[in-house]
Structure formats: C-alpha cells, structure tokens
Amino acid sequence: MIGVPTVADAILDRAIHKAYPLDLSGDSLRKGRSAPAKDERA
C-alpha cells in the first residue's frame, strides 16, 4: 500500500505512539465458533 518504507515507518510510529498494550489472556472465542475439521464431519 505505502511504497516508501520511511513514510510507512513514520505513519506507524504516529499511530502507536500513545497506544496501550492489551492483555489478551484466556480461551479463544474462535474455538467454539469454528467449523469442524474435515475428518470430524464424517
């Protein structure tokens, strides 16, 4: 998307300068919602 690496670095630096880290511990919600694997469908 952005062809110049320096510009991309500058944009990301501005975007995450005041970002807060999030603790994402615990079980994934995707596990219960995902479709069963091919071998489990039979």
Image: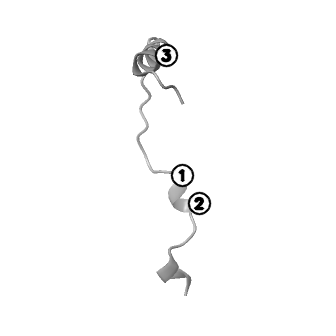
Judge the density around disc 2: few (<14), some (14-19), many (≥20) Cα neighbours within 10 Å: few
Residue 34 at x, y = what percent?
Answer: 56, 63
Secondary structure of the residue carrying numbered label 2: helix
Determine contact: label 2, label 3, CB under 8 Å: no
Judge the density around disc 1: few (<14), some (14-19), many (≥20) Cα neighbours within 10 Å: few
Which residue is at the front of the view, 12 or 38? 12
Using the image, tell me which numbered label, if any, was put on residue 2: none
Tell me which amino acid carries mark 3. Ile
Cα–Cα gap, marks 1 and 3: 31 Å
Q: Is residue 33 above or below residue 22?
A: below
Cα–Cα gap, marks 1 and 2: 7 Å
The residue located at (50%, 59%) in the rendering is: 31
Name which of mark 1 and mark 3 comes first in the sequence: 3
Residue 3 at x, y = what percent?
Answer: 48, 25
Name which of mark 2 and mark 3 comes first in the sequence: 3
Determine contact: label 1, label 3, CB under 8 Å: no
Q: Nearer the viewer, mark 1 or mark 3?
A: 3
Secondary structure of the residue carrying numbered label 1: loop
The residue located at (53%, 55%) in the rendering is: 30
Judge the density around disc 3: few (<14), some (14-19), many (≥20) Cα neighbours within 10 Å: few
The outermost residue toward the front is 3
9 left or right of 37 in image:
left
Using the image, tell me which numbered label, if any, was put on residue 29: 1
Tell me which amino acid carries mark 1. Leu
| Quarter occupied by residue 21 | top left
Using the image, tell me which numbered label, if any, was put on residue 33: 2
15 left or right of 9 in image:
right
Q: Which residue is mark 3?
A: 11
Q: Nearer the viewer, mark 2 or mark 3?
A: 3
